[in-house]
């Protein structure tokens, strides 16, 4: 090679290497707030995963055609007395159905009570967002009442609710059609304890004690007197040989969307 050609070759080689290697862009340092490590309780995680499976809540397979079954249902929560109620039910090994109001779920700090309803194996149902008489609302408003509550409960618990209770029992063909579209069965009742009217624990317990096999009992966990009535209520019905079940367990399956149920 001629001597004068060597520098030219070296220049060409350096040019090729420079073009083939991407230049590093200057890095901008971003200051971030230190984050605390997230500690996940394996037991809680397992419960959450189970709750997300199809067919939740898992039925305990009671044969309510043969057994004396009764479904206790609690409306309008979660409220300040709901945790004490959950403690009482857990101590007795009793499961119930909770029809929650979306606004109350939103006010539940961190969703702790709402999640505990699910984690303790109770059934959770839609009781609208703000508790209006649904039959008096336009179709779009009914949809919003149900959808908003559905969304917040699913976000907090991972559960897609399958049952609902129209506030005041206010329903009609249009409400039934909307609940069918939302995949929700309408659950009414055949035993009304009137606990919202008579705030006396002994009176509430006595009225609940009149339940018959297959009854759905209407209660409200937002009243202290109702929660006070629960031990006597369970004692009275237990002595009569009743088995306490969720609404879905009462029927042995998830109730059909749009259909109205008052008792088995």
Image: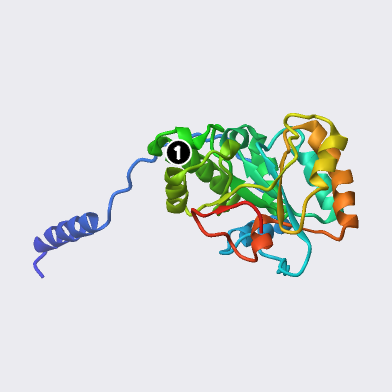
Report helix, strand or loop for mark 1.
helix
Side (left or right) of 162 relative to 91: left
User: Residue 259: x, y in percent?
Assistant: 51, 55
For the residue pair 11 and 154, the one nearer the viewer reads as 154
- For the point 59% across and 36% down, the residue is 168
- For the point 91% across and 56% down, the residue is 239
Side (left or right) of 121 relative to 93: left
For the residue pair 203 and 161, the one nearer the viewer reads as 203
Side (left or right) of 5 relative to 146: left
Residue under numbered circle 1: 142
Q: Is residue 39 visible?
A: no
User: Residue 233: x, y in percent?
Assistant: 85, 46
- For the point 64% across and 40% down, the residue is 111
Q: Is residue 194 visible?
A: yes
In which quarter of the view is residue 105 placed? top right
User: Residue 87: x, y in percent?
Assistant: 82, 45
- In the rendered image of this protein, does residue 260 appear above or below residue 229? below
């Amino acid at each position: 090679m001629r001597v004068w050609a060597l520098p030219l070759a070296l220049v060409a080689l350096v040019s090729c290497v420079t073009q083939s290697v991407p230049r590093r862009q200057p890095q901008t340092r971003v200051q971030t707030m230190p984050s605390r490590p997230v500690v996940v309780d394996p037991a809680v995680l397992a419960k959450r995963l189970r709750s997300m499976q199809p067919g939740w809540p898992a039925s305990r397979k009671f044969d309510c055609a043969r057994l004396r079954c009764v479904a206790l249902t609690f409306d309008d929560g979660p409220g300040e007395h709901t945790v004490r109620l959950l403690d009482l039910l857990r101590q007795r090994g009793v499961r119930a159905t909770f029809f929650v109001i979306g606004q109350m779920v939103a006010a539940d700090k961190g969703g702790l009570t709402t999640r505990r309803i699910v984690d303790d194996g109770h059934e959770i149902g839609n009781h609208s967002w703000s508790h209006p008489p649904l039959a008096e609302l336009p179709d779009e408003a009914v949809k919003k009442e149900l959808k908003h509550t559905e969304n917040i409960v699913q976000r907090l618990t991972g559960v897609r609710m399958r049952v609902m209770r129209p506030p005041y029992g206010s329903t009609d063909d249009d409400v039934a059609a909307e609940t069918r579209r939302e995949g929700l069965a309408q659950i009414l009742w055949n035993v009304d304890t009137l606990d919202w009217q008579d705030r006396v624990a002994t009176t509430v317990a006595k009225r609940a004690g009149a339940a018959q096999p297959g009854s759905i009992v209407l209660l409200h966990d937002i009243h202290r007197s109702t929660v006070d009535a629960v031990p006597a209520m369970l004692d009275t019905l237990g002595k009569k040989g009743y088995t306490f079940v969720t609404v879905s367990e009462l029927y042995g399956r998830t109730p059909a969307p749009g259909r109205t149920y008052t008792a088995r």
